[in-house]
Image: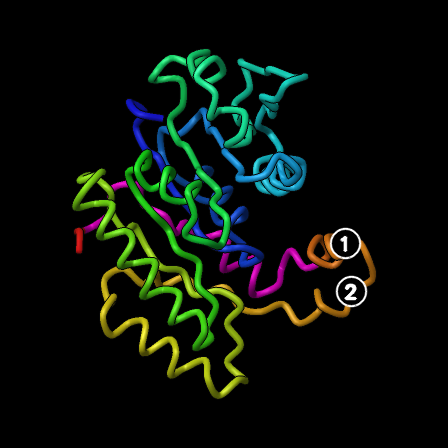
Amino acid sequence: VAGNKAGLVVLATGLGKTYLAAFDSAAMPGVRRVLFVAHREEILAQAARTFRSVRPEANFGFYTGDEKAFGADILFASIQTLGRQAHLGQFPRAAFDYIVIDCPPSLGLLTLNSLVAASAVVIPMQCEYYALEGLSRLVETIDQVKAALNPSLELAGIVLTMVDPRMNLTPPVADEVRAPFRDEVDTTRLPRNVRLPVAPPPPGRAAGRERRSHAARASSRPTADPHPRRSR
């Protein structure tokens, strides 16, 4: 990853981080080649479907043990594959304009390695009090990595997701996040789509019909800036 123009770590699960990455890669000027690195190989196909719904004109490909699409505009690979030097060495340092590292919702070794490799972090956060506790631990870890291992690491933004204004806890949680992170909290807020939990399988059909929903319009606005306004 070192040597590329931007490396972005997205931390969370089930909160729309893949859509955020897809829309951001489409909205940023000068971004042509994108590498999406997933923390599990099983989710590569799902990530590709998400990117294809946002960027249907792009050339997609996978880098796995069986498929190596070097010429793809958007390439999908797993951390397990690219963690081997024999595979990572296949790409020159300037091969990609934008790299997204999809991390598991934990502070394990994969996440720590991703923080060391990246230049920016985006945190999608659900508006709940348990998420607040996790946010404080995560920011503390980011500060430790920045101090000891990766001085260029920046917090690019915190995106409030699954926002439901009908719930009483949403406004106070959002206020508590903005208090210490006023400049980092993005103005884009992704509302909860109430049709998805009750949709028949596969739930992607319901999401596909809701292209004009509040969530779809909100997520189409770029959120991540690989060159943040300021560091903490």
Task: Tell whether 21 sits left or right of 3.
Answer: right
**Is the Cβ of the residue at disc 2 closer than 8 Å to that at disc 1?**
yes
Tell me if mark 1 has few (under 14), some (14-19) or many (20+) residues whose alpha carbon lies within 10 angstroms of its own.
few
Q: Residue at x 44, y 38 (%)?
A: 101
- Marks 2/1: CA–CA distance: 8 Å
* Residue 218 within the magenta-colored segment of the rendering: yes
Which dot marks residue 117?
none
Asked where in the image residue 194 lies, by quadrant, the reply is bottom right
Tell me if mark 2 has few (under 14), some (14-19) or many (20+) residues whose alpha carbon lies within 10 angstroms of its own.
few
**Mark 2 vs 1, N-terminal side:** 2
Q: Where does residue 141 sit, x and y in percent of width and height?
A: 29, 54
For the image, the number of numbered tags is 2
Q: Residue at x 53, y 37 (%)?
A: 38
- State which region is magenta: 210-229
Dot 2 lies on which element? loop
Residue tagged by mark 1? 205
Q: Nearer the viewer, residue 207 or 140?
A: 140
Way the structure is coloured? rainbow
Dot 1 lies on which element? helix
* Residue 20 within the magenta-colored segment of the rendering: no
Q: Nearer the viewer, residue 212 or 150?
A: 150
Residue 115 vertical position relative to residue 221 in the rendered view, above or below: above
Residue tagged by mark 2? 199
Q: Where does residue 3 sit, x and y in percent of width and height?
A: 28, 22
Specify the quadrant that holds the C terminus.
Answer: bottom left
